[in-house]
Amino acid sequence: MSLAVKTVFRVFPGLTVVSLLALLAINTSSVSAASEKTPFEQGIAAYNQDHFTNAAEHFSKVIQAEPNNAEAYWWRARVQFNHGKLIEARRDLAQALRLNPDLGPAYRSRGLDLARQGRYREAILDFNKALSLGVPEKDVCATRAGCFLAENRPKEAIADCNRVLQHNPNNAVAYHNRAIALHFTGHYDKALDDFNMALSINPKYVPALCERANTYSYLGKLKEAVVDATNATKYAPHDVTSWLTRAEMLYRIGDLETSMAAYDTAVRLSPSNYKPYWKRGIAEMTVGTDIEKARWDLHKAVELKPELMRDPTNRAILHEVDNDIQKAIGAWESALAIDPSDRSARERLALLYMVTGRPAKAAVELDKLLQSSNVHDTVMLLRASAAYQMGDTQRAITECNRALKITAGTGNAYMIRGTAHCQEGDLEKGLADLTEAIRLNPHNRSALGLRSRIYEYLGKSELAAADRAREISLPLPFMFAATHRITWDPNKMPRLPKNQNSASTTSSPGRAPATR
């Protein structure tokens, strides 16, 4: 008897020779069973363990032995997709469907690939086919919901997400997609609830952080929006969407310098991606301090993605940056004819009406937006500006107060409210507001010009000259920044200023400097 066997009997004194032989037979049979797995089964096992190279080798052996095995081609395509070998994967997938046109999982795989390419309508057709061939809803509907969203079909997206959540109430992707659809339909509070659910399941779910930031901004919760966007860039420092979201949220709170730096980071991360150029161009156009750079960015985006110009909304933006206002108005009107619920298009159209001196027409469009339960502060500011230009200073002050409850932003609310206070004769309040507007945005040429005229009216020549010098040193505002071109006419003040000082009595208060 060998030493090894003697040792076994010593450790297990009750073990008989017969029992030992039986045990050895069992172990031998299990090893034999493992070694008898077919190459196909070994390929699936390797794939499930993320051993993709081994999996590809096994499936290639199957295909070599069985060139008409559609499932082997489909499995090898899945392996190739995971390796990033897209051409080979698509070739295998096409062969699988040629061999078996009823292979439902292959339609799902092709749908996923089409969705990644942005070919959402084709992807939806493949997902529909997969479902008709028996692929479970839980394996299809979450991704199809994302395609429905991309095709502006939010109701169908919500229905798909509901199906997924019936099967799996802990599916973060389904909550995320349903939240986007709810946001799209204006249900911001419900959207926020779903984003919160998605992030409770996965706190580092970057797309949900970015989209929740957007919803927070619509609800006026800009501090929370900035926190979400900042966390997104922390968890995914190389993700372009995270940086674009952070840039936009920083812009909304008035941090223009940091916002532009975030846009620059997005461009550096993906210089061949049209989106960072497009977003940065719109931001630059809105600030209005470097319109040539904005024009370059927007045209660069169109160069990278010419199909942008198929959308009337994008055509309108390009017409704006090229200063072709009438064409831009026509494009925005076309966009609204296609989708009357497009809030952004209505806001931009109102803005152009303001720029072209038609505040009454702008007010009509803005009042439609103000009927919503959730209104952007920019809409309130445009309505304030329209009210002021129509002579309704009280409405202007009211809308500015509403906007300031959301955010101080870039200071335009203070500028409009300050001018309205001055027009009503309360120069003390007016000067305080204009000064705050300039503190928030030292490049606010309009606010500097207005304050210089107030100082001149009050006989404070040195202060007036200093503001005028700063105003002249700044570039002329482009159309967006010029939207709030508020003028002040002291001859129309209903009474003498409450805080008129001795200096102003020597400066002939009844004679006003030229207004803009």
Image (cartoon, grey):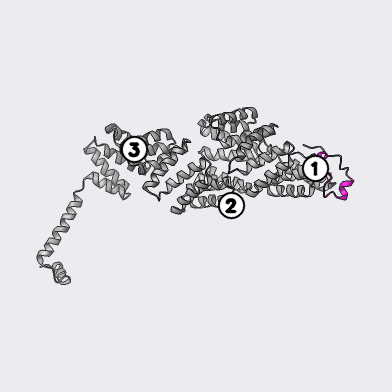
Residue situated in front as seen by the camera: 475 or 433:
433
Crowding at dot 2, Cα within 10 Å, few <14 / some 14-19 / many 20+, comes out as some
- Residue type marked 2: Lys
Crowding at dot 1, Cα within 10 Å, few <14 / some 14-19 / many 20+, comes out as many
- Comes first in the chain, label 1 or label 2: 2
Query: Disc 2 on helix, strand or loop?
Result: helix
Q: Is residue 346 above or below residue 419?
A: above
Instruction: Provide residue 26's location: percent of width, then percent of height.
Output: 15, 58
- Residue type marked 3: Leu
- For this orientation, the residue located farthest to the right is 506
- Residue type marked 1: Arg
Name the residue beneath numbered marker 3: 131
Instruction: Provide residue 276's location: percent of width, then percent of height.
Output: 54, 40
Judge from the rendering whether residue 9 lies leftward or rightward of residue 433; answer left or right.
Answer: left
Query: Disc 3 on helix, strand or loop?
Result: helix
Give me the C-alpha separation between circle 1 and circle 3. Answer: 70 Å
Instruction: Provide residue 69's location: percent of width, then percent of height.
Output: 24, 37
Give me the C-alpha separation between circle 1 and circle 2. Answer: 35 Å
Name the residue beneath numbered marker 1: 453
- Comes first in the chain, label 1 or label 3: 3
Residue 36 falls inside the magenta stretch: no
Q: Are marks 2 and 3 in contact (CB under 8 Å)?
A: no
Name the residue beneath numbered marker 2: 223
Q: Which residues are magenta?
A: 489-506
Judge from the rendering whether residue 56 lies leftward or rightward of residue 173; answer left or right.
Answer: left
Q: Is residue 204 visible?
A: no
